[in-house]
Amino acid sequence: MKTATPGLARPQSALLGIGLMVAATFAFAVLDGLSRHLAGRTNTVMVVTIRYWFFAVFALWLLWRRGGLRRALASRIKGLQIVRGVLLAAEVLVTVMSFTLIGLIETHAVFAVYPLLVAALSGPLLGERIGWQGWAAILAGFAGMMVILQPGTSVFSPLSLVPLLGAAIFALYGLATRFAARADDALVSFFWTGLVGAGMLTVLLPWFWQPIAREDWGLMVALCVVGVASHFLLIKAYDVAEAALLQPFAFLQLVFVSIIGVTVFGESLAPRVILGAAIIVAAGIVGLRVSVRRGRGRG
């Protein structure tokens, strides 16, 4: 077993992990931009299904390469893994649909609340202790969401509830993943996510089939390549550094998405969205730090 050299290997691993995480968030932002464009030209189900086919092939290859295919097929929690796969595919459909309805920036600003939804649900569903600091972060995050949505005013649009639905579904997926982690490792869960999602979307596809324009096939291939690259970078990031160190950098996706939204799609950064997103991100980082301290206290 190799041991890390104090003061040398760990900082290098941390720096590499952060670099990979930043690259992954940028790749996911590009993926969302491509999804928004292509879904607007064909339809959401077509785009997400083709993306998932490549995702499933990648998951199958990765598991085979690491010798875990038999272990994955022998999972004792297949029912839970199927639920996870359905939840994630549903979340991707809802979120990509939201891109076409209200744009990248506002979708991601609202969607950023999902870690706080996970924290709020982890108490009643997982029996985890949240504490007053955790609840304060959750309430602050929801206040930020209200700043963005502004219900009861002329600014409010019911379409803004679409990304909130996506965030809620993703939060349930996150909780189901925590349950699954007690029985299966991350690679096995990754395989089931791709397999089930691709199967579910393939069943839906005949009702939404639409020819893809010849000029869009290059972007469709790019979508699939960037999708695989983003997941690969994320996996590698978590391979070399701790999740608690990397998670705050995931919020950079909102920054990258905003740049793409403004420069490519001509979206605007409304003051309410900037303020609300800043509150949500700050609350999410505080909630993460509280969770990490609580975990260390149990250790």
Image (cartoon, helix red, strand yellow):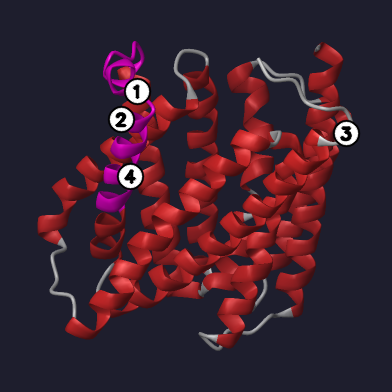
- Residue under pointer 2: 64
Q: Is residue 104 left or right of residue 73?
A: right
Q: Circles 1 and 2: CB distance less than 8 Å? A: yes
Q: Which residues are magenta?
A: 52-77
Q: Circles 2 and 3: CB distance less than 8 Å? A: no
Decide whether residue 259 is among the magenta residues: no
Give me the C-alpha separation between circle 1 and circle 3.
Answer: 43 Å
Q: Circles 3 and 4: CB distance less than 8 Å? A: no
Q: Please provide percent x and percent y for residue 69.
A: 29, 23
Q: Which mark is residue 67?
A: 1
Give me the C-alpha separation between circle 1 and circle 2.
Answer: 5 Å
Foreground residue among 246 and 89: 246
Disc 2 versus disc 4: nearer the observer: 2
Label 4 sits on what residue type? Phe
Mark 4 vs mark 1: which is more N-terminal? Answer: 4
* Secondary-structure class at tag 1: loop
Label 3 sits on what residue type? Gln
Question: Farthest left residue?
Answer: 206
Disc 1 versus disc 3: nearer the observer: 1
Foreground residue among 125 and 228: 228
Q: Residues within 10 Å of mark 3 (few under 14, many from 20)?
A: few
